[in-house]
Image: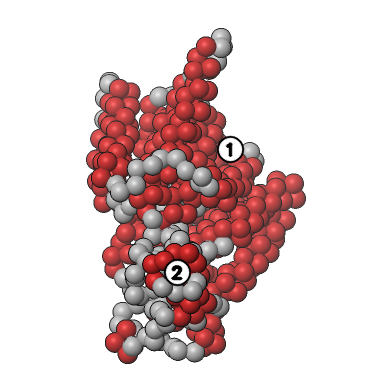
Amino acid sequence: MSADSVAVHGKGKPVAVFENEHAGFDAVDVYEITARLEASGISDRTARKRHGAKDVFDYAQSLVQVRSAAQVSGPSESWISRDALLEAVRRGIVLVLGAFLGGLTATVMAANTREVLVAGIGAWIIGQSISGIVWAHAGAGQVNRGIARGTGATIVVMLVLACYMAVSLVIPGQDGSWAGLLMAWCWYSCVVSMLVILGRSWYLLTILSVAVTIAALTLVLGHSAALPIVVSVAVLVLAAVTLALVTHLRTSSDRRLFGRGNWLAAVAPAAQASFLAAALSVALTRMPAWEGKALVVATVIAAAATDPALVLMRQRLVWSSNRTPLLRHAARNARSLTMAMSAAIVVISASVSALVVIFLVGDTRVAATVLVAAAFSSLATTSTTLAAFGLPGSGVVFAGAAFLSSEAWITGGNAAGILVAMAFLVAGIGVLLMRVSDPRTYA
């Protein structure tokens, strides 16, 4: 749901160097090895000049390997990777803390609620776009190039927003503070997205924990200088994440910030985020202000809970596929496992959203808000899962389904909205089941 939380894995296994002798490991056939080599940048000409083969297919035939008994996961091996799971948990906490700090800063600045919501949505969409650009390269084993291109795209976005802010300051009657808030939020979202992909979650978690603690204590104690203190803390956080990104770029092997073909990778993530943001905005128009804030908080927390669940799901699928050599059995096991785990993920996401709404609103009679939160988080989770398993187009489609469900809720009432959401949810799980039938999509 967010670039700050869900780290979308690449569509194929990276082949970082041409001499990589493991390019054929675990491949279904020589055609998959050929696809991996071509995805890594090897052409027929490269295969002839560097490897003495007629073409890429001929070179792939020389890399065919059979998985040895030592490489097969044993039945007693644990399927949970603790490091990957903890990394996902940290990413989720970073998402929540970042949103919380942004809310505290907007509170002390007495910013208009609508302006804060628009700025947050804009930052989310742009952050997702930059994340898509970075992952387009990182999925092929070119993380440094992806970070460089993502930084270049971020700079372009910041220049456009700076021009908008300058125009707002010049035109009489226009307030440039909103443009400044949008710039700061977009910069934070983009930089944090790239640092998360770099695996700097510990760094981000430490900085945000300290910042949120200082800001929260300042507001709770009612300090007379709350405004400058909280704003200064937010600025220091921006400076800290920027410093981490600059440090990486200075030591990176690829510093070229601009290149062709970058913007196309941003289309699907931006469209997905836009549809989800539109669905949330439509739902908010029918709710009182306080219930609307509870829905936003529930959405953020549900997104944070989705990331570890997806990591567990992928790990379990990989572990299950390694236990059988037959593709038919692996596909059947994957479908059964996906049905159970996707249902669990949807239930957890919906339950978290419902509990947050009830806790914040403090009234068990807000059934409509609870249903909307559960339906929205379920469809958003389905959209995110499809994108994470290499179906960005389907992720966009079911993000659009969330928007249609919100429209149905507004025009037709609670029953219509829930029925439409459930129909799309079942369809989304069906698409996911077909996707995981091929173990290559998650191996």
Q: Position of residue 81 (x, y in %)?
A: 31, 71
Q: Is residue 336 visible?
A: no
**Is residue 232 visible from the viewing direction of this image?**
yes
Up-down relation of residue 441 to residue 350 (above or below)? below
Determine the residue positioned at 61% across, 58% down.
393
Badge 2: residue crowd in 10 Å (few <14, some 14–19, many ≥20)? some
Seen from this angle, which residue lies furthest top?
Answer: 172
Which mark is first along the chain, 2 or 1? 2
In space, the residues marked 1 and 2 are separated at their CA atoms by: 67 Å
Query: Which numbered disc covers residue 288?
Result: 1
Left or right: residue 403 compared with residue 355 = right
As drawn, the label of residue 48 is 2
Query: In the current view of this chain or complex, which residue is farthest to the right?
Result: 412
| Residue found 44% across the figure and 64% down from its top | 46
- Label 1 or label 2, whichever lies nearer to me, is 2
| Residue sitting nearer the eye, 401 or 3 | 3
Name the residue nearer the viewer: 442 or 25. 25
Q: Residue 20, position in %: x, y?
A: 34, 70
What residue lies at 56% left-to-right and 9% top-to-bottom? 172
Q: Residues within 10 Å of mark 1 (few under 14, many from 20)?
A: few
In the rendering, at what x and y percent does residue 238 appear? 33, 34
Q: Of 125 and 37, which appears nearest the observer?
A: 37
Q: Residue at x 30, y 48 (%)?
A: 253
Residue 276 against residue 174 in the figure, above or below: below
Q: Position of residue 19 (x, y in %)?
A: 34, 69
Amino acid at circle 1? Pro
